[in-house]
Amino acid sequence: MSERKMIYLCLAHMSESGMEQKYVKEAFDTNWVVPMGPNVNAFEGDLAAFVNRRDFSTHPSASLEMTEWKDRKVVCLSAGTAAVHLALISCGVKAGDEVLVQSFTFCASSHPITYLGAKPVFIDSEPDTWNMDPELLEKAIIERKEKTGKYPKAIIPVALYGMPYDCERIMAIADKYGIPVIEDAAEGMGSRFNGQVLGTFGRYGVLSFNGNKMITTSGGGALICRNVEDANEIMWYATQARDAYPYYEHTAIGYNYRMSNVCAGIGRGQMTVLDDHIAHHKHVQQLYRELLADVPGVTLHDQPADPRYDSNFWLCAATLDPSVRIVGQENAYKEVIKSAVGGAAGVIKSVDSAITDCQPNDNVEALRVFMLEKKVECRPVWKPMHKQPVYADAVAYVNGVSEEIFKVGFCLPAGPAVTDDDVRYIVDCIKEAVEK
Ligand SMILES: *Cc1c(COP(=O)(O)O)cnc(C)c1O
């Protein structure tokens, strides 16, 4: 019998046609092995064409134009984190300012706020999308103004696991108070709200091409900009902020954040399969929907029935009822983790204790361990930022939703390499894990 291969959450997946290698080879052949060049320009063009493609065909409220439409521009950067950082700078965020950010997210949404000496103010989620709660958002805007005398400088909603936030309400609130929105669509590339691609509603939209996202450049990101002026400013900051003289003249602090022409070659190849990847993630979600329907205690996280929502279903997320007992549950959290759980390679700091004061329930941890033994990667959902020790002093507007989901939630494989048979096997393993 052959060894079963590990099924990962979402891995980089190159096109069958090998277009990535063709464009990368072109970069070498033409000596454009630098952070600019033909691949970068062409990738930006492809991305702009993608984000500007609106699909109102299946949307009943299609006539509703939520934003004044201009062709969006896209600037390629070295990472999605860099995109968040530069968007904040362009929105005028400075030391001491406050920025409202979704608490239920990966740290790249909020860390760049602190790079600038500004303060994240965390906003909890609504139960249906798991994303920024519009009511809490407005409450926070009003209260921060009362308490500090100033409005927050930006709002960062996040398309968690690809799910669109309520674009209509969040944009309406932001417009009412004149606060720019930076959409973190790193996980939501190609997700749509009312037919319009996420990242094109706000002043800026963040994309990520890390190895585990919808498409990859090995590592990289981009910023969707509303106009040429914003795009030029971002490009200027991304290339050390040089003024137009024959020598290096600087009137601002810049960054080395431009994308490499080699990486952009991978990105150009990946653009040829982006639509396939999105269709595949949706297909996998549909299969989980059918197969998990009769598993008691397991609830798939799905999009609202509201037809405006069109998620790319980057990862399949679900929740486990606290009453469900999982095989091996009595051993949950007995051992300190020795290596990184999850995709992000790199050094993790060793810890003395196997537990923290806010962690997934024992049955969720037992399910992770059970699935790992079955060679299936199953991961907890993101731990809310307002529960992270590093943000212990941050202001947070909470309703308990993200903390509750963190205790019961988990993620299942959904990437382009995951086959129908894999999904069936995964669901069978979950059934086996539940104690009868
Ligand atoms: C991946 C991700 C980013 C950007 O990350 P990079 O690895 O820097 O490209 C930003 N926000 C969220 C929510 C993400 O998942």
Image (spheres, rainbow, N blue to C red):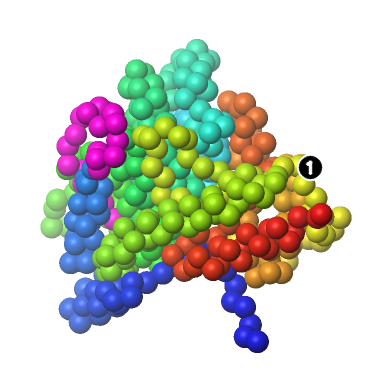
* Vertical arrangement, residue 145 with respect to residue 216, above or below: above
| Range shown magenta | 55-76
Q: Is mark 1 within 8 Å of ligand 1?
A: no
Q: Secondary structure at mark 1?
A: loop
Residue 95 in view in this figure: no
The one of 18 and 84 positioned closer to us in this rendering: 18
Which image quadrant: the N terminus? Answer: bottom right
Residue 404: quadrant of the picture: top right
Going by the picture, which residue comes out furthest to the top?
Answer: 146
Majority secondary structure of the magenta segment? loop
Going by the picture, which residue comes out furthest to the right?
Answer: 330
Residue type at mark 1 is Ser
Residue 194 within the segment the image draws in magenta: no
* Vertical arrangement, residue 92 with respect to residue 36, above or below: above
Going by the picture, which residue comes out furthest to the bottom?
Answer: 1
Q: At 76% from the left edge and 50% from the top edge, which residue is drawn?
A: 363
User: Looking at the picture, how far across and down is residue 216, in whole percent?
Assistant: 38, 63
Total label count? 1
Q: At 62% from the left edge and 85% from the top edge, which residue is drawn?
A: 2
Q: At 50% from the left edge and 21% from the top edge, which residue is drawn?
A: 135
* Vertical arrangement, residue 115 with respect to residue 332, above or below: above
> In the visual, does 257 lie left or right of 143?
left
Which image quadrant: the C terminus? Answer: bottom right
> In the visual, does 69 lie left or right of 196?
left
User: Looking at the picture, how far across and down is residue 27, in whole percent?
Assistant: 23, 75
Instruction: Tell me the crowding category of disc 1: few under 14, some 14 to 19, or many 20 or more residues within 10 angstroms, Cα based.
Output: few
User: Disc 1 designates what residue?
Assistant: 323
Residue 327 in view in this figure: yes
User: Looking at the picture, how far across and down is residue 140, in whole percent?
Assistant: 51, 21
Residue 432: quadrant of the picture: bottom right
> In the visual, does 162 lie left or right of 398?
left
User: Looking at the picture, how far across and down is residue 70, in whole percent?
Assistant: 17, 37
